[in-house]
Image (cartoon, rainbow, N blue to C red):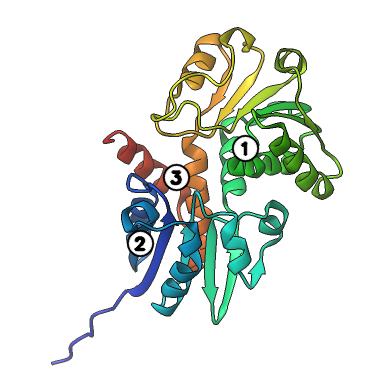
Amino acid sequence: MNTQAAIIPRQLHVGLIGAGIGRSLTPALHMREGEHCGLSYRYDLIDLDVRGLSVSDLPALVDEAEAQGFAGLNITHPCKQAAVALMDELSPDAQALRSINTVVFQGKRRIGHNTDWWGFAESFRRGLAGVSLDHVVQLGAGGAGVAVAHAVAEMGARSIEIFDLDPLRVKTLVDQLQPAHDACTFSVGRDLAAALDVADGLVHATPTGMAAHPGLPLDAQLLSERLWVAEIVYFPIETELVALAKKKGCRVLDGGGMAVFQAVKAFELFTGIHPTAERMMQHFNSLRTMI
């Protein structure tokens, strides 16, 4: 009697390195999509806080993952910039941003990518299609701020005026991104009210609005219904800024799409498989309602 051998799913092992990542939805998104794609997909959390480690331990952690046969790693705060020096090669976007959130182990080479910017851009294209990008105001010039400013420029913005509590950080962002974007002018913001008076939209890229940092990132009176508003915070999905913008009648993009689409692109880099973005978005929405 003929018997058919059981089909053994392709095995894949990846992980996420960062601090305070216990509530991350990324592992669940990857593993569920892996199941749908016929993979035996393992995704480990490598939490610096849980292990009592710091950014200085990153080289050893990356070495360890590579030695254990990981296909790759996701990298998050506070390791995105430090990981750049550990790579053999950077994608063009990672090179421009000097920050990575995805590492692919390819043979004996480490290739660094940044999918944050693409995740924001893809979410924006789907959620705020057709809005004007002539003049954009952005709040926040940290690691996430660099990624989203790059994304907005890549989508065709003509000017991006950037505000941050640390003026030096804004200048660093401008100096870093301007050479890569001839068609877009980056500038250091000085008068937020005046900037918003002539802006088409507002991008928010600071931690304000997160569960641990509640509040609004600007005076509520400065927000006008003629502005579109794009948020990157997704814990909670409806930040105070998102709620206010909806109340004012603005077109609004919450931070969920960026979280999902950065995972979509990372999944593709790890597996070589194009995942179903809509399915991952549905899964994300189901997960966040349980938090």
* Pointer 3 residue: 278
Question: Is 157 situated above or below 176?
Answer: above
Residue 13, horizontal then vertical, whole percent: 38, 69
Q: Which one is closest to the eye, mark 2 or mark 1?
A: 2
> Residue 43: which numbered mark, if any?
2
Sequence order check: which comes first, mark 2 or mark 3? 2
Q: Amino acid at mark 1?
A: Arg
* Pointer 1 residue: 125
The span from disc 1 to disc 3 (Cα, nearest Å) is 14 Å
Tell me the SS state at disc 3. helix
> Residue 287: which numbered mark, if any?
none
State the image quarter where residue 152 is shown: top right
Which residue: 38% across, 48% down? 21
- Looking at the picture, tell me which residue is in the foreground, 47 or 25: 47
Which residue: 49% across, 57% down? 55
Which quadrant: the N terminus? bottom left
Mark 2, Cα crowd under 10 Å, few <14 / some 14-19 / many 20+, is: many
Horizontal placement of 94 versus 269: left or right? right
Residue 148, horizontal then vertical, whole percent: 64, 40
Image marks 1 and 3: residues in contact by CB distance under 8 Å: no
Sequence order check: which comes first, mark 2 or mark 1? 2
Q: Is residue 273 visible?
A: no
Sequence order check: which comes first, mark 1 or mark 3? 1
Which residue: 55% across, 82% down? 108
Q: Amino acid at mark 2?
A: Tyr
- Looking at the picture, tell me which residue is in the foreground, 269 or 175: 175
Tell me the SS state at disc 2. strand
Horizontal placement of 149 versus 286: left or right? right
The span from disc 2 to disc 3 (Cα, nearest Å) is 21 Å
Q: Amino acid at mark 3?
A: Glu
